[in-house]
Image: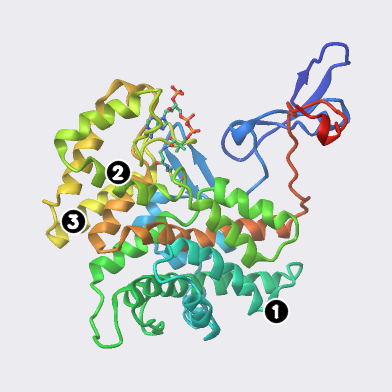
Amino acid sequence: MTEPKAILTIPGQPPIDLPIRKGTLGQDVIDIGPLGQHEHFSFDPGFTVTASCESKITYIDGDQGILLHRGYPIEELAEKSDYLETCYLLLDGNLPNAQQKAEFENIITTHTMVNRSVEQFLSGFRYDSHPMAMMCGVVGALSSFYHDSLDIADPQHRMITAHRLIAKMPTLAAMCYKHYIGQPYMYPRNELKYAENFLNMMFGTPCANRPVSPVLARAMDLLFLLHADHEQNASTSTVRLAGSSGANPFSCIAAGIAALWGPSHGGANQAVLEMLAEIGDEKHIDTFIRRAKDKNDPFRLMGFGHRVYKNFDPRAKVMKQACDNVLAELGIDNDPLLRIAKRLEQIALEDDYFVDKKLYPNVDFYSGIIMKAIGIPTEMFTVIFATGRTVGWIAHWNEMISNSYRIGRPRQLYTGERQRSITPIEQRG
Ligand code: CMC
């Protein structure tokens, strides 16, 4: 059977055959590689129709609202798995058996401490630094501690780094928060589960031994799980691009954290809560909806819309359910911001503008609300996203490095000045 191909005709040139490649799921892809032998290349700002790589980790069908990690639907993972098991799945390709799971949990638990110098490093940040600013710096700085495992060509080194990152991110995240609020750091405790340990480091103090609520620990674990990976989003693509130059994994993850911070990406969860506070009262919602629809107003409804999902974000569905459970269990159903959020969601789901443009609530809309209910301050929202996403970043980085790869080097359509000569300064107008 002949391989399927697309034929591109450029005036004055012989037709160019472009192979059509098929994945296991999803749309076919036109391989534009042969264009490189001709005098043209493609133009696709924002990568809206460009696959940047081949991957076996995560699949999204944005029209159907499907998200699979290594073939498993996110809804099923959320119900029957937990964050660390999902980490194992993303890294390894398969779910662990009971022994593998116990070993993995033990490895992660026993790598949660960070070098004491990290405390000194953090003390150099201004007392009110945004925790994401500290995270970008401190995660990048980890490369200065682990010279023993920075050979990216060695699969063993890559796996040790993955374990270290997954284990230390909650510790670092909580340390950034403690620095931000001026409290002593809390050390990790090996008898606690991953999410429970994180909440203890966030909210515990050396003076009081307050057990973490199992409801909140489960919600936290779910938050990490729902953020674990999302194929080639901006931050993951950043990690891959940084990694394609051969940079060390800690600096690649730091680059991913920086990319995540923007309000169009992971920064949206903080922006949602800020927006709800700005709306302030249900009676102002119509004004904000009007602003969101006004082309001349840069305001957007934060937590709505997605590049890939033109249907409900499946993570948002799980998150909404979890959100309702957490709020009910905590007895919080009369919070003014939550009332605004619920009303906003209802209006946006019925309004023609949002319906026509398929702008559904995304994961950040509900995650902010859950995190607020758990008592997490808004400045930490994106840090928590980064903590959960670290496994996705490192799994993609590892997948790229394990296969043949080239440095990522996009081209451009140049629209600047043609070549010109320098006029002596005294003759310039
Ligand atoms: N409020 C109002 N209008 C919107 C919104 C919104 N939240 N999102 C998109 N639109 C409009 C946009 O103005 C455009 O209209 P038109 O076709 O008339 O020019 C149309 O919908 C398509 O939008 P786009 O900006 O071309 O779409 P995109 O794929 O480039 O952007 C997005 C996707 C998520 C950045 C965008 O929907 C957005 O800014 N949403 C708010 C921020 C947000 O919630 N981000 C979190 C994303 S999910 C988690 C994550 O990835 O981190």
The residue wearing badge 3 is 327
Q: Quadrant of the C terminus?
A: top right
Q: Is residue 241 left or right of 228 when viewed as pictured?
A: right
Count residues near mark 3 (Cα–Cα under 10 Å), then give few for <14, some for 14-19, many for 20+. Answer: some
Residue 147 - label:
1
For image coordinates 23% across by 66% down, the residue present is 215
The residue wearing badge 2 is 275
Type of amino acid under label 3? Leu
- Badge count: 3
Q: Quadrant of the N terminus?
A: top right
Where is ligand 1, by quadrant?
A: top left
Question: What secondary structure is found at the residue carrying circle 3?
Answer: helix
x and y percent of residue 132 in the render?
46, 61
Residue 86 in view (yes/no): no
Q: Is mark 2 within 8 Å of ligand 1?
A: no
Q: Is residue 312 left or right of 158 when viewed as pictured?
A: left
